[in-house]
Amino acid sequence: MIDDIDLSGLRENLFDLGRCLITKNALNFCKTHDICVEDFVHRHQYGDWGDLNEDDKKINENAIKFKQQIFSSYDFSFGKINIITDKGHLTTTILLPSDN
């Protein structure tokens, strides 16, 4: 199951997020570890791709120009959160690697 999250209070950034969704697993992970998911979505939209290598960061930079998929990954000692904005930038999903 996937829930909508409200990010309307965030300032304008590099690209549109479209509809923002979070999986139940990611939501539970964030609640359990007291993680503010909105902060990480904001980082994603601002161009802080998290724990990616330089090649993947360049792919994201090009993806902004051509409305291709944008991927961010944020590592913690207790797990990881991924954020994916789809091709066309109609939907952004927050998920755990195990949700793929």
Image (spheres, helix red, strand yellow):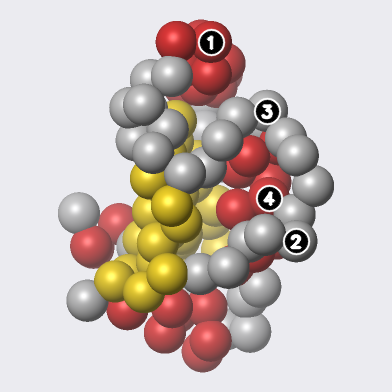
The numbered disc on residue 14 is 3
Report the mark closest to the observer, 2 or 3: 2
| Gap between marks 1 and 4 measured at Cα | 18 Å
Image quadrant assignment for residue 47 = top right
Image position of 20 (left or right of 1): right
Question: Looking at this view, is 29 or 84 the one in front?
Answer: 84
Q: Amino acid at mark 3?
A: Leu
Q: Earlier in the sequence, mark 2 or mark 4?
A: 2
- Which residue in the structure is indicated by mark 1? 65
Q: Nearer the viewer, mark 2 or mark 4?
A: 2
- For residue 13, what is the image quadrant? top right
Instruction: Residue 42: give its label.
Output: 4
Regarding residue 6, the answer to whether it shows in the image is yes
* Amino acid type of the residue that numbered disc 2 sits on in the rendered structure: Gly
Callout 4 secondary element: helix
Report the mark closest to the observer, 2 or 1.
Answer: 2
Residue at 36%, 26% in the rendered image? 88
The residue at the point 23 percent across, 63 percent down is 98
Q: Quadrant of the N terminus?
A: bottom left
In three-dimensional space, the C-alpha distance between marks 2 and 4, rounded to whole angstroms, equals: 10 Å
Q: Is 35 rendered above or below residue 93?
A: below
In depth, the one of 82 and 66 nearer the eye is 66
Residue 85 image position (x, y, % from top left): 42, 39
